[in-house]
Image: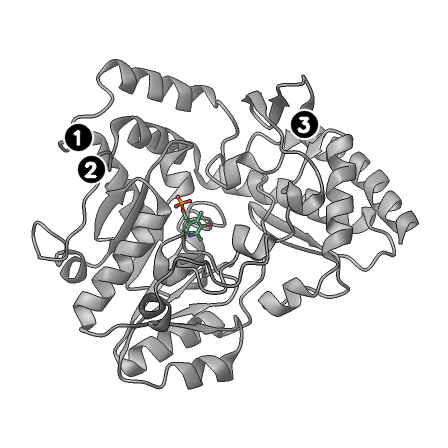
Amino acid sequence: MRAIGRDPLFIDHAAGAEIFDVDGNRYVDYVCSWGPLIAGHAEPSVVAAVVEAAARGTSYGAPTEGEVLLAEEVARRMPGAELMRMTSSGTEAAMTALRLARAYTGREVVIKFAGAYHGHSDGLLAQAGSGLATQAIPASPGVPAAAAAATVVVPWNDRDALIAASGRDDLAAIIAEPCPANMGLVSAATGFLELLRERADAVGALLIFDEVISGFRVDRGGAGTRAGVPADLLVLGKILGGGLPAAALAGGRELMELLAPVGDVYQAGTLSGNPLAVAAGLATLALLDEGAYIRLAKTTDALAQGLRAAARDLPVSVVSTTGLLTVFFAASAPRDLREAQACDIAAYGHFCRELLARGVYAPPSQFEAWFPSLAHSAEHVEQTLDAARAAFAAVGEAS
Ligand SMILES: *Cc1c(COP(=O)(O)O)cnc(C)c1O
């Protein structure tokens, strides 16, 4: 909120696509907890599942049937997910995926992309997206030089840079968001995901897809499955926990069995696979059938096309895919972090303030995607577009 020159909202409650602050203001919510709430706030079947689970005990420190059912559902949606290890956050899952890749390959160096966000572990904070991009923090203080040195940062969609950076025999892994949404939504250029796979294979490194946002959102099987590009390891979160803390890494059996206690790569977590979070995740995934993705795609398209029309002759690019959208104040869609940073960030901030004043809560940073949900109705979209027409007009007048 500081990025757009406003005080934060303090929330009182939320239902469906609507969120209410402590001052009694109602907003159509496109932040939706930054991604988990694909079914909207307090979806009745999710709430019922959590209440029922809570009454049976909130945590055991031992496995439950729910974890197994959740892993089976993930495996049905994501072909490479033979085994799954649950954590409480995407940060932990990404951190463990790297540890596993390093143990498996006996190598240390990892390639990540500028503007990608993989949580806040030391080695992954270099030129990260999300809050770091919003606050223009290129590398966080407190990260040991050795941790940063093992990470090579490459511009997204830059084939030559990727080929040059990956031509080394100490590369453990390439980690990427197959549908990057933490510098705003930036598409993968044709063939770029295939090139990631090719380069990892060429040097014997692993390919890790971080699908914490895109998994179960852009497609029932995530962005990698949609593109037909398999990864060696998947990092999952957000929707997986249905609004409660749950995340996971998943992959092939041989690789995953390196994790303790079967193997000796250590990983643990007191509340991992928490029964409430598992119940919320299962109830959420149960809602996500083919029809749900068709509806979500329709809502996203209506919103994206409406926003493009509402912007009239302002230099605005609306980038969207099922369940994700970003409004960039630039004549053409950014292809990487540098181009995302070159957009008119101040104009976005103004646009966002004007939307908030009209009851629409869009992410208060151009470096975060909008998260339309199954709870967003045609009326919510109409209300949003009414607000957007006025907000774009106000931005136009100010420029
Ligand atoms: C949110 C996010 C994470 C981190 O997940 P947390 O649960 O917030 O730790 C990792 N990767 C991506 C792509 C994310 O969007």
Q: How many marks?
A: 3
What amino acid is labelled 2 in the image? Val
Q: Position of residue 277 (x, y in %)?
A: 32, 30
Badge 2: few (under 14), some or many (20 or more) residues near its Cα, within 10 Å? some
Kind of element beneath mark 1:
loop
Res 64 label: 1
Q: Nearer the viewer, mark 2 or mark 1?
A: 1
- Residue topped by disc 2: 68
Disc 3 or 2, which lies upstream in sequence? Answer: 3
Question: Viewed as shown, does residue 212 lie left or right of 83?
Answer: right
Query: Can you tell me whether the CB of the residue at mark 1 lies under 8 Å from the nearest atom of ligand 1?
Result: no
Q: How is the image coloured?
A: one colour
The front one of 225 and 9 is: 9
Res 27 label: 3
In space, the residues marked 2 and 1 are separated at their CA atoms by 7 Å
Disc 3 or 1, which lies upstream in sequence? Answer: 3
Q: Position of residue 51 (x, y in %)?
A: 34, 16
| Residue located farthest toward the top when viewing the structure as drawn | 55
What amino acid is labelled 1 in the image? Thr
Residue contact between numbered discs 2 and 1, judged by CB atoms under 8 Å: yes
Kind of element beneath mark 3:
strand
Q: Position of residue 167 (x, y in %)?
A: 36, 86
The front one of 118 and 86 is: 118
In space, the residues marked 3 and 2 are separated at their CA atoms by 37 Å
In space, the residues marked 3 and 1 are separated at their CA atoms by 38 Å
